[in-house]
């Protein structure tokens, strides 16, 4: 395994009791300095990790990004929007979900610090998003327009590792989620999340957590009861 740069650690979804290798990608945590604006600082640290570029070399990328502040409950992207943008979660928590005809909400994903959020169906298929992306708590995003990013990459090929990282990280997240539903029981999915991201379990409302795990709130309550009884 490669040596990690400062302020990074490996993250993934280990599969409890299974002899399988999880996907691992670095999660980057941002430490601000007084020398640069928050956006430039955060993006520079990420770019430096991926490309080894200096602050001056990374300036064109930083100049295309902006900081987006969301309050708890605020939408980042709504179902039907055609926003082709990618955001890095510096602070906070975002839920992606679809509202069915009966009003039931099905959670697609949760994104927290050090992860990316984007309406991939819009970016890939050039169609309106089928999902809402909404802040569950006050959230700070570092946002860049995907098409502007493409133009930037054509002009400055040294940024290509940035796009490769986003694509591979997105694929890894998707594969880990699919594998968890194919290979794990609901209780195992819950235990894996508790073990690896207990802070997320504590920050997400039970109904959203249950939806994320693919179960009902009643089933989540029963799983917790069984776990308590075994202890």
Image: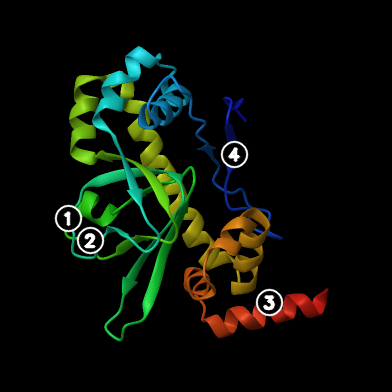
Counting residues from the start of the chain, the first of labels 2 and 1 encountered is 1
Whole-angstrom CA distance, mark 3 to mark 2, is: 34 Å
Tell me the quadrant of the picture where the N terminus can be found: top right
The picture places residue 148, in percent across and down from the top left corner, at 19, 34
First reached walking from the N terminus: tag 4 or tag 1: 4
Marks 3 and 4, the one that precedes in the sequence: 4
- Going from N to C along the chain, the mark reached first, 3 or 2, is 2
What's the residue at 29%, 25% (across, down)?
61
- Tell me if mark 2 has few (under 14), some (14-19) or many (20+) residues whose alpha carbon lies within 10 angstroms of its own: many
For marks 4 and 1, give the CA distance: 33 Å
Task: Look at the numbered discs 2 and 1 and tell me whether their residues touch, using CB distance below 8 Å.
Answer: yes
Picture quadrant where residue 138 is located: bottom left
- Given this view, does label 3 or label 4 mark the residue nearer the observer? 3
Number of other residues with Cα within 10 Å of mark 4, as a class: few under 14, some 14 to 19, many 20 or more: few
Mark 3 and mark 4: Cα distance apart in space: 28 Å
Q: Quadrant of the C terminus?
A: bottom right
Provide the secondary structure element on which disc 3 rests: helix
Snapshot quadrant of residue 44: top left
Residue that carries the numbered disc 1 in the rendered image:
82
């Amino acid at each position: 395994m490669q040596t990690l740069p400062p302020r990074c650690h490996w993250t993934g979804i280990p599969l409890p009791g299974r002899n399988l290798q999880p996907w691992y990608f670095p999660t980057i945590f941002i430490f601000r300095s007084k020398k640069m604006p928050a956006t430039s600082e955060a993006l520079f640290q990420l770019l430096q990790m991926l490309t080894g570029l200096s602050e001056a070399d990374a300036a064109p990328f930083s100049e295309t990004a902006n900081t987006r502040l969301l309050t708890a409950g605020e939408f980042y992207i709504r179902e039907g929007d055609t926003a082709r943008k990618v955001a890095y979660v510096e602070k906070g928590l975002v839920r992606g979900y679809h509202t069915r005809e009966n009003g039931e909400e099905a959670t697609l994903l949760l994104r927290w610090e050090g992860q990316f959020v984007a309406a991939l169906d819009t970016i890939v298929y050039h169609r309106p998003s089928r999902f809402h992306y909404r802040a569950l708590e006050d959230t700070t995003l570092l946002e860049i327009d995907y098409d502007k990013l493409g133009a930037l990459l054509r002009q400055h090929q040294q940024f290509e590792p940035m796009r490769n990282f986003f694509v591979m990280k997105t694929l890894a997240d998707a594969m880990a989620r699919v594998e968890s539903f194919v290979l794990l029981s609901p209780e195992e999915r819950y235990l894996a999340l508790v073990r690896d991201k207990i802070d997320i379990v504590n920050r997400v409302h039970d109904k959203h957590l249950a939806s994320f795990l693919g179960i009902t709130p009643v089933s989540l309550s029963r799983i917790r009861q069984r776990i308590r009884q075994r202890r």
